[in-house]
Image (tube, rainbow, N blue to C red):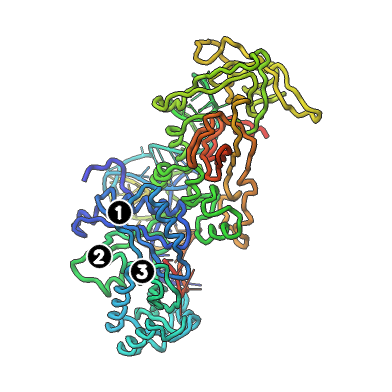
Amino acid sequence: MEEKRSSLNFIEQIITDDLRAGKNNGKVHTRFPPEPNGYLHIGHAKSICLNFGLARKYGGKCNLRYDDTNPTKEEQEYVDSIREDIRWLGFDWEDREFYASDYFDQLYAWAEKMIMDGKAYVDDQSAEQIAEQKGTPTVPGKESPYRSRSPEENLRLFREMRDGKYGEGEKVLRARIDMASPNMHMRDPIMYRIMHRSHHRTGDKWCVYPMYDFAHGQSDYIEGVTHSVCTLEFEVHRPLYDWFLDQVYTPGTVRPRQIEFARLNLNYTVMSKRRLLELVQMGIVKGWDDPRMPTISGLRRRGYTPESIRVFAEKVGVTKTDSVIDVSLLEHSVRDDLNKKAPRVMGVLRPLKVVIENYPEGKVEMLETVNNPEDESMGTRQVPFSRELYIEQDDFMEDPPKKFFRLRPGGEVRLKSAYIIRCEKAVKNEKGEIIELRCTYDPDTRSGSGAQRKVKGTLHWVSAAHAIDAEVRLYDRLFNDPDPMGHKDRDFKEFLNPDSLKIITGCKLEPRLGNVRPLDKFQFQRIGYFCVDPDSTPGKPVFNQTVPLKDTWGKVVNRGS
RNA sequence: UGCCCCGUGGUGUAAUUGGCAACACGUCUGACUCUGGAUCAGAAAAGUUCAGGUUCGAGCCCUGACGGGGCAACCA
């Protein structure tokens, strides 16, 4: 094992201790166990990176295992999306794609064994009665009147349950543990319930399905998982996890160990599949992959890279402390990655026409410009320059405040990779709106010509005759409140940000962007990072803003107002 | 009122396992810049929830408070 300079997180600490103690024959085996009842989100990404990362770091393996024990909630669509998202993130489970449902036969056999060992019994009571007898955290539960049936009777009944003799809810199989346990999960938890439902994998083979607690640890055991990493809310389940394992464990085999860590929380969003599903079903967002969603598919469509998400997952750390990560860390992770990778282009979101009065009509110059100042190897390209251009409306002010070093009447700016121009006059319409700028250029200042003149501001621009039209979608956080779920008596949807999506049409982009494919990523200089949306059609590209560039001027302006 | 877990700058994570608290994000200066981006330099910001105790010495160990979270689905 190579010496690691950075410190180990507490799970790595446990693993290295286990390894040192010679446990599990020196093997490390993890698993990522999603329930296929929704799309994966950034919180799952943390878990994926953790589990697959642990396996990679310690030379072990990580399985993908669908936790599909509840046929009423699980669907093939989700299975497929999960597979795609994990692959996209850059992880490989090779041939180890498993399902809890693969183990239904084994689980059933174990249940019968537990019945014969007097560790499980069939209860005829209703869900309400069972809940009532369960007690409360401070009051011990009462034992079921069916608790002392003979193993033979239990076995007969359980087999009848399996054979479909009973309706849903008529009977359940319970573990016989301790109705007075201070841990609610140990009060004779339900192992099997009857569901006359067909399952997305096993079809109609079964009408009894195991509960999570009975299925999860046993599945880990079957797969030879050494370290079963889950989130904090399962902490109180651990004694039960261990108890079930005790019932079937064979000495000398690998015994899985459950370790809990704090799930990822991000501010200004919600992170539960249930809430996300609600947003989808109510049409508040356009789907699971809406770029405003914290889902992996949403982030992908928004323009996030797998690398940026992996780096983010690394940076948030692994602890048992409940925490809320600031979205700015996520945004920083993409900016940092895209800064190195994204080709620079010029695009004008809200065009303002500029006419260079002293530039010959009909003349077109091809000017060379660098594709990425951060990476020489990305080369250069040519952009057309002509008498009529577009610049950003925001880049001109008739009566600007101090420190505004963009264009103003009588002022000068450099057009990126082109010339220095001076604004001679702003043309207005009847309503007093500025509709066009009349400018002049200094022919001696062409970029790359060795011209020495300096001006304070540099603007992006695009040649009017050569520009292509595009739609650009700007996104902001989905919620205005840092913790939409944190308000008692108020629905999280009350905190939706009405401006989370702004669609801008009529944007003017340099010709280079006429030929792009979905998910291509660019930096629109001085604006932000953008990604081609699958809604694009030939000749009509649609771009999603992944994240804006840091805007120190915008900050100054906001401070003033 | 039971059980379990957690408590370090605004946020998140560290601290060679007891040696006078570091890194990142964010914030704020300034330099540089043909992206007000990037980069570079610097600053503010915690004395580690509190109170005792052990120790030459405690963020790390012990005790007790306080604060936060989780647990009573035939969900996972």
Q: Residue at x 29, y 76 (%)?
A: A110
| Chain-order first, disc 1 or disc 2 | 1
Name the amino acid type tagged 1: Glu
- The mark closer to the camera, 3 or 2, is 3
Q: Residue at x 41, y 86 (%)?
A: A165
Q: Residue at x 35, y 89 (%)?
A: A149
In three-dimensional space, the C-alpha distance between marks 3 and 2, rounded to whole angstroms, equals 21 Å
Residue under pointer 2: A255
In three-dimensional space, the C-alpha distance between marks 1 and 2, rounded to whole angstroms, equals 23 Å
Residue under pointer 1: A94
Q: Position of residue A308 (x, y in %)?
A: 42, 42
Residue A258 lies, with reference to residue A205, above or below; the image says above
Name the amino acid type tagged 3: Ser
Q: Is residue A473 left or right of residue A218?
A: right
Q: Nearer the viewer, residue B61 or A343?
A: A343
Q: Are marks 3 and 1 in contact (CB under 8 Å)?
A: no
In three-dimensional space, the C-alpha distance between marks 3 and 1, rounded to whole angstroms, equals 19 Å
- The mark closer to the camera, 1 or 2, is 1
Name the amino acid type tagged 2: Arg
Give the letter of the chain under mark 3.
Answer: A
Describe the element under mark 2 as helix, strand or loop: loop
Residue A344 lies, with reference to residue A264, above or below; the image says above
| Chain-order first, disc 3 or disc 2 | 3
Q: Nearer the viewer, residue A86 or A541?
A: A541
Give the letter of the chain under mark 1.
Answer: A
Residue under pointer 3: A101
